[in-house]
Image (cartoon, rainbow, N blue to C red):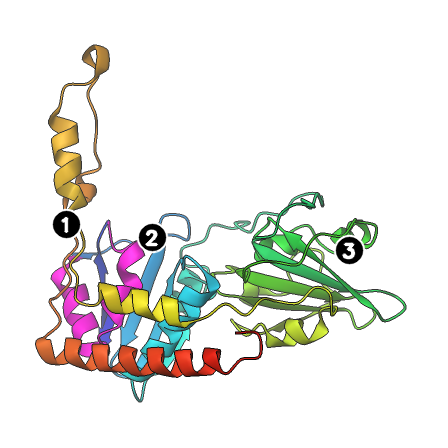
Amino acid sequence: MVVENGAWRRHFSHWAANRVVADLLPGPAAATRCFRANREIDEWLDDVWCEGAALVDHDRRVLRWFAFADSWADHVAARAVLARTWPGWDVRFAHDGMGDLTHHLGLGRDLTRAPGWFETFEPFWSPDAEETEPWSVVSLRLPGGAVRAWGSGLETVEQVAAGPRLIDLLAGSPATPPPADMPYGGVHFDPRARTVSMWAVQTVAGVHDWPLPGWERWSLDFRGDDHTHQAALLPADFPFPRPPLAPALRELAGHAGTPPPDAGAVLGRAAAAAGLQGTAAVVNPSALVPHETGDPTPAELAELRAVLDELVAAAEDAEGARPDA
């Protein structure tokens, strides 16, 4: 989505969700060319069908974006590069997904959401005592003041969808091992202060609709993608790991300027082939249209590579100086 001279336009690419970060990295001009090179649309996609998006507001110099990152380090690496290649812009991850984009346009957060869209469910808790790569980390301050923590296979926002009754299940739950890799987010419950603290490197749609069902007398301390508050609360035997950023930055450098594969061509050939027992494949027509990158200029790519080289060098220096390196 591009905003310029008071007007905004929506553009769509079937294959863009996993390309959002790559298309944004070369800076505002390249990203705008990329979006405009793809099909303009009139309809809105909701949080289910829109798996990645960006809003580039040239009038207010604001960038809002969301896309799934393969890891915590991938998200942090992308944020570090965007902070350098979008100088003077207010660059933020859209934690509320489409809600953040429509809110920025003055259209509210519920434009693409049907009434009652936020799904709640009965509380349950079944941690895997062998799982060392949890999706999120949940911590709880006990009545005596101590803090316990568990790894969880639920997404961050799912930890609050069951309401405060989850806390009673947590208190009697067996221990889980500390995470071997950084999770995608975390939630900390403090019953005495009646506070829920939350962070995530993924979308947590509905976070700005607090109080969510069941939490009417609780306050929310939303930390964006900053995990350090929860890290300071975790028990000494349950620390967050410290994954290196240099590999994630080098991976971004390896993809800089690389065009996406033409998946549409592959699907087209597959759809044309004879199916089993007379069946025929049906392909979404949008999937046959390749994603247009807008072709970053040599100067834009050179600047991006210089930024990546500097960030990789700084990350390697910092990681080499760490006591646990």
Residue 44 among those drawn in magenta: no
- Give me the C-alpha separation between circle 3 and circle 2: 35 Å
**As drawn, 118 above or below 86:** above
Please tell me whether mark 3 or mark 2 is closer to you in this view: 3
Image: magenta residue range: 15-39
Answer with mark 3 or mark 2, whichever residue precedes in sequence: 2
Q: Which mark is residue 45?
A: 2
Instruction: State if disc 2 and disc 1 touch (CB < 8 Å).
Output: no
Mark 1 element type: loop
Q: Amino acid at mark 3?
A: Ile
**As drawn, 311 above or below 215:** below
Residue at x-position 16% and y-position 29%: 271
Q: Nearer the viewer, residue 88 or 258?
A: 258
Identify residue for label 1.
290
Residue at x-position 34% and y-position 81%: 313
Percent position (x, y) of residue 172?
A: 83, 50
Identify residue for label 3.
167
Q: Amino acid at mark 2?
A: Leu
Q: Is residue 312 visible?
A: yes
Please indicate whether residue 255 sits to the left or right of residue 96 in the image.
Answer: left
Percent position (x, y) of residue 234?
A: 71, 69
